[in-house]
Image (cartoon, rainbow, N blue to C red):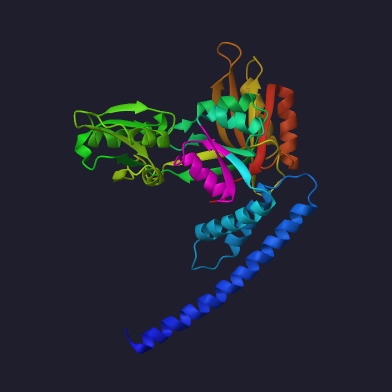
Amino acid sequence: MSDQLIKQLKQHREQIDVIDAQILRLVNARAEHARHIGELKEDGVIYRPEREAQVLRRLMKENTGPLSAEAVASIFRSVMSNCRALEKELAVAFLGPLGTYSEEAALKQFGEGKMAVVCGSIDEVFRSVEAGQADYGIVPVENSNEGAVGLTLDLLLTSPLKVCGEVTIPIHHCLLSKQSDIQKISHVFSHAQSLAQCHEWLNKVLPAVEREAVTSNARAAQMIHDLIASDGTFAAAIASKRAAELFNLNVLAENIEDDPNNTTRFLVLSPHEVAPSGQDKTSLVIAAKNQPGAIVALLEPLAQHGVSMTKLESRPAKEGRWEYVFYVDVEGHAQDVNVASALQEIEKRASFLKCLGSYPVAVI
């Protein structure tokens, strides 16, 4: 390495040291303001998803690079998470064990400055937040390939909790095992949706293996850690790279999902509602009266008041044979004038209406 190159490297590193010191002072100054805000608030609510969404959107808009918008969002999520933890370490419930995509969603939304409440089922996530054992919960609600998570929708119908946020996670599955030879795999364990998302890959690469659904991908990875058959065959799990690290497993194949754009959407559950952020979504559950044209009549107020519908999903009602409820997502916050007017009109026409919550649209 030439003396000139060494000199240039030294100059850049010295500048980085100066900038790092400036960043440290500014981050601590930000933390002081965040702490004062916490002292001034009277409702005791620490996590403000609408405010955090506004901050992230503004910073990504102002970003001139070379960092990507995703990188900027990741950095400032971490800053906000650690500032939030000065007031209180929030307890966040998600479907476990560690290594699930639900944990990944929790990390993305809340950062490292939180306490994990690892649950054995989606039902338990709801119960933990309802009982005050967790401040917030993260639950999967739909996958871009496999559609809605029916259990989550059913629980939203009866739970007193509100949806206060959404998180989207790109899903990249790996085949994990203690074995290093993929040809010796005889069983594959994973969540039912993950097995479905990798159906064609399994048919092509491992057509003869037995497939068994379990409660989560990470649970599958945890199970096969000790599942070694006496005849020399081995089990494998479909899970994330993080699960491979957590359970000391070999990655036999990466990105085995049939659709490279495979994405899962998660909802953030809360005991409280959130204020408008300026770019929001509202989720509803409605039931139509038993009369001709009732479903069309339910949706007419949305068009009349200029409210865009982004999702319509039907589910069997828990009461009454052959009766259905409809899960609807619309653009806007329930406090927006046009959305509020549409909801008032829908309520007059519906046999049942429940607002699951208004919340910021996912930021990246």
Q: Quadrant of residue 213?
A: top left
In the rendering, at what x and y percent does residue 329 appear?
60, 35
Specify start and end residues of the magenta stretch as a single range.
93-119
102 in magenta: yes
Q: Tell me if residue 317 comes above or below residue 336 in the rendering.
A: above
85 in magenta: no
Horizontal side of residue 28 vs 176, given as left or right: right
Marks counted in the figure total 0
Horizontal side of residue 243 vs 127, given as left or right: left
Q: Tell me if residue 67 comes above or below residue 330 in the rendering.
A: below
Q: Tell me if residue 309 comes above or below residue 277 in the rendering.
A: above
In the rendering, at what x and y percent does residue 272 appear?
71, 38
**Residue at 65% in and 47% down:** 49
| Residue 313 is at least partly visible in this image | no
Q: Residue furthest top?
A: 321
**Residue at 54% in and 61% down:** 72
Closer to the camera in the image, 190 or 169: 190
In the rendering, at what x and y percent does residue 351 appear?
69, 19
**Residue at 25% in and 40% down:** 179
Closer to the camera in the image, 235 or 192: 235
Quarter of the picture containing the N terminus is bottom left
**Residue at 60% in and 58% down:** 79
| Residue 53 is at least partly visible in this image | yes
In the rendering, at what x and y percent does residue 87 appear?
69, 51
Closer to the camera in the image, 32 or 324: 32
Q: Quadrant of residue 307?
A: top right
